[in-house]
Amino acid sequence: MFPRPEGLHAGRAFVYGPLCSLFFSLVLVLVGLDVKTFQFRFLGLSALALGPEGAVRPFSVASLASEVPGTGLHPHSADLVWLQFVFCVFSMWMVIAYHITLMVLWAAPLTNRLQRHGLVCAQVMNAWSALDVFMVSIMAGVLEIRQFALFIIGDKCDGLDALVEKIPPIASRVPGRVTCFDVESELKAGFFVLLVAVIVSTVVGNIVMHRCSEALGVEKGHATTGATGLGEDDAGALSRAALPVVSAA
């Protein structure tokens, strides 16, 4: 059991620190979902064909989800719409719901039954939130996509590359080295915003769920206002924060 620290400021930090951290993480998630997370820049003849605007493709989590139905041989098919829905659920909606559930579980005056249901919901949402998986996959993709693409192309463009090099008017207009296809990828600001949000929510979320789990195993609280060093209002908030006093069902 985590003991309640003595002293006014320590007690308040113990109560309101996790709530403020979760709110901060939620704000970062909401901002990071709409900020550009990664970017592809196409080079070579492919960039020349796509044009200056089409050769640069930045993506955020939200914009990536919005473009899923338009991909594939049959755009906006049922399969692609379902894939978009699944992506949104696990990468965005479940993450937001997880933060909100933890804040309610930590601060709201719930009965023992509701706290138990809320804790189970938070645990399920934590397991289903795949934003951290998305971050790892994006980082791996940015590091490996160029090598993977060039491996697929292999020597299929060697003849075309040699031909273009012999035509200076075209070769001089090719972005990057003279080749039929090349790509550069980089992480953008949104990736680092989401990275901080994932770290904060993972650490604080596990702390909150652990304290709430221990609190739900205590039938009768033993903390008093004097023991916490808090005033009456703060002591009331502390008892609602599952540390360790839980209202009777």
Image (cartoon, grey):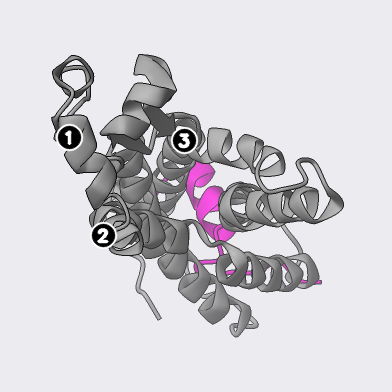
Q: x, y percentage for residue 213?
A: 56, 78
Position of 234 with respect to 9 (left or right) is right
The dot on residue 178 is 1
Position of 107 with respect to 2 (left or right) is right
The residue located at (14%, 35%) in the rendering is 177
Q: What's the distance in space between the residues labelled 1 and 2, CA to CA?
A: 14 Å
Q: Name the residue nearer the viewer: 67 or 248.
A: 67
Q: Which residues are magenta?
A: 228-249
Amino acid type of the residue tagged 2 in the rendering? Asp
SS class, disc 3: loop
Amino acid type of the residue tagged 3 in the rendering? Ser
Q: Quadrant of the C terminus?
A: bottom right
The residue located at (18%, 23%) in the rendering is 167
Seen in the picture, residue 96 relative to 36 is either above or below; the reply is below
SS class, disc 2: loop
SS class, disc 1: loop
The dot on residue 60 is 3
Residue 218 is covered by the magenta coloring: no
**Residue 14 visible, this angle:** no
Callout 3: 10 Å neighbours few (<14), some, many (20+)? many
Residue on which the image places disc 2 = 155
Amino acid type of the residue tagged 1 in the rendering? Val
